[in-house]
Image: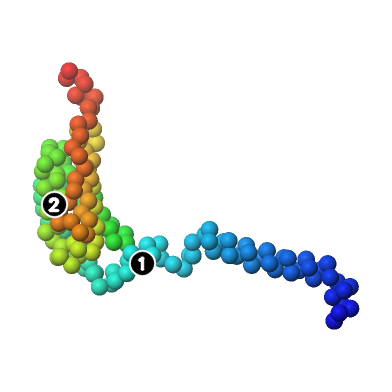
Amino acid sequence: MKKFLKKNRYTCILIFIFVLFVILGLKIKDILVPDEGKATYGDRLKNIEKHPISSDIYNKVDEALKKNSNVVEVSHHLQGKTLNYFITVGEKVSVKDAKAIGDGILDFFGDDVLGYYSIQVSILKEDEELNNFPIMGMKHPESKTISWTKDREIVTESDEDEE
């Protein structure tokens, strides 16, 4: 064995250095590249199975919103702990009325769901050129109400023509 090592010492050193570089490369990869086996949200989704939202609730919310004559279209999307609602309203709906429509969503969910999930509401108008839209609202699990974006006045071409 000693003869073999003496005769091939440079080869053995190169093999040792190569193995060392492979091990170091894997460690660096573990540090720089997240583990694909772990969930995107980490521990934030812990106990999510204890707070299910049934499809019946989604259907009730959608039906109630669609019964409102000001609502044109409703869709929702659950991603992690965030429930997103996208509502399109008619051209004659004011910002105040649109916010009231969005606030009505909270009435359908129990305290268990409201205390666990974040709820985001995006309200758009059919005519995108109308002022003050889209408006966005967010309800954090620890809050009781939706916080809406600050009202803003957007000047449209039709407003400029009137001046």
**Looking at the picture, how far across and down is residue 67, in whole percent?**
11, 53
**Disc nearest the viewer among 2 and 1:** 1
Image spot of residue 28 (x, y percent): 58, 61
The quarter of the image holding the C terminus is top left
User: Which percent across, then down, holds residue 145?
Assistant: 15, 53
Please tell me which residue is depicted at 11% across the width and 59% down the height of the picture.
107
Position of residue 101 in the picture relative to residue 79 (left or right): left
Residue 126 visible in the snapshot: no
Marks 2 and 1, how far apart at CA: 29 Å
Q: Is residue 49 left or right of residue 36?
A: left
Type of amino acid under label 1: Asp
The residue at 73%/65% (across/down) is: 17
Query: If you read the primary sequence from the N terminus, does the residue marked by circle 2 or circle 1 appear first?
Result: 1
Residue at the bottom extreme of this rendering: 1
Q: Secondary structure at mark 2?
A: helix
Mark number displayed over residue 103: 2
The figure's colour scheme reads rainbow
Report the residue marked by disc 1.
Answer: 43
The quadrant where residue 63 appears: bottom left
